[in-house]
Image: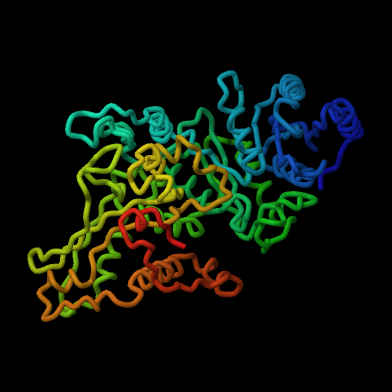
Amino acid sequence: GSCFTPQQLLMRVLCSLAFGSAVGQTVTPPPDTSKTAVVLVLQGRSDAAPGAYDDLIAQVQSEGVKAGVSVWAVTGPSFDDMKSAIQSTVSAHQAKLFYAGHGMGGAGEAAAEAAAGDSTAEGAILVAGFLPRDYRPDLQACKAKWATQPTHKCPKGKGLPLCPGGYLPEGSHDCSATGVPAPKFPVPTLAVGGELDGVVRVSRVAEAWYTQKQTPEHKVAVVEGMNHGDLLGAVPASVQARDLVSEIGGDKAKAQVASIVAGFLADPKSYNPPAADDTLSPFEKMFVEQEGSWWWTPNSEESGSSPWAAAAQEKMCEPLADTKLQWETSNEFHLLSDEDGIPPYYRAKHRPNVTMQDGKVAGSTVTQLRYTTLTVTQVAAGENGYEIIKEEKAGILGTGAITDDGSDCVSAIEIATKLSSRQLCYNRTNAPEDPETLDDGDRCAAINEAAYDLAMATASSTARARFQKSGRPMKMVSDRKPTPPAGPWWIWNYLQ
């Protein structure tokens, strides 16, 4: 460890006396003040005990010296409480300022402070955190469209008189965009996730990693085997209740995070953390190349597609009577309720189909990604347009249906898809017979089993081995028809 001169020891005591009593804030000087001065302001979890981050801070300061920076650490319950300490410490040492947070409470506030118009920050460090979706211009624009709501005034020929279910002109909530929905943020950022964090899921960190690939100033690192509590001294009960089991322990986790943070503090624009591709690329394969996620891609309820939902049609129909036939499948995103008599858009209906084209089987499907749930009663069996649009991308963002804090899945609740029956497939491919019994059995369960198998095959070897050892296997249950088995009860009846 580093040795302290009597002057440095005295400085530590004086700083603690000066700031330690001010609403729990503390200024901790570096072990070596001869390097380039930086001030690291950390807002931790609100439920963390006093001193919970002392070991992490000490390691960051030690690693900072190696990286060429003297890290003055300011910690406290909130950035507002630490304002005077921040200003005086930055001024006294002509230091560069960095905001940091642990968990999305602290990390979200750190991002907000760094992005403030009067901020002098050089960067933001989001430990067990990420840049929220609100910093992506495409999603901001989509969210703003939610302010336009249906009215009872509708053009001649649309709906019933006065449109009791509401009317919106086509395109009112159009959230179509181009390219990956990347963030726009004024200073460099570093997000550090734990592979086994049960509070801020690594899947949400993976989303940040993918959407920030074209913005290299916003860096993402993942510490394999680290959970949420590894960086704390005493771990709060609220964290213990949700966290996964660490595979590396607190000492190794703090050492790795400290090294990454120190590298960023020394050179926020050029520093590159250890590559996380092996851990995170499987998420890209599933959410971009299969699901067609609204958050990873520019897709929305009326634009884009799900490659998995396209492939599901072939899985529904196989095996065909003629096993040599080849498939070409396609998919489109639409609201499943779209129909000329359904508010608020009164659009043309969208249906799946199977045809023969140039000697191949062409299957087209219609999909809606679901991120929230509504009841048949809420939507008045499809006649309440004010409720139906809450499932749109603008509705999800505008109503706050999803809390973007990493605590829940980033995937859709389901990839709800209209598929053609196996009987129709046999009919369209000129099979000798096409009885109704072709659709007996659990065709949907088989498709879901295939999705499960694909996830297992796509996972990293480490994640797969861990799951096989300690995970909870999934079993697909039999298909169920809703009661009554009619359109609205199919649409607003979610995967269980």
Q: How many tags in the picture?
A: 0
On the question of residue 289 being in view, the answer is no
Quadrant assignment, res 5: top right
Residue drawn 78% across and 47% down? 55
Closer to the camera in the image, 147 or 181? 147
On the question of residue 83 being in view, the answer is yes
Closer to the camera in the image, 146 or 48? 146
Quadrant assignment, res 432: bottom left
Q: Residue furthest front?
A: 161
Say above or below: 133 vs 240: above
Q: Position of residue 435 (x, y in %)?
A: 19, 78
Q: Position of residue 231 (x, y in %)?
A: 72, 50
- Colour scheme used in the picture? rainbow
Say above or below: 275 vs 76: below
Closer to the camera in the image, 366 or 25? 366
Residue drawn 41% across and 32% down? 137
In the displayed structure image, the side of residue 23 where residue 153 appears, left or right: left
In the displayed structure image, the side of residue 374 where residue 435 appears, left or right: left
Q: Position of residue 378 (x, y in %)?
A: 43, 45
Residue drawn 54% across and 66% down? 463
In the displayed structure image, the side of residue 466 where residue 394 appears, left or right: left
Say above or below: 294 vs 443: above
Residue drawn 41% across and 28% down? 147
Q: Position of residue 240 (x, y in %)?
A: 72, 56
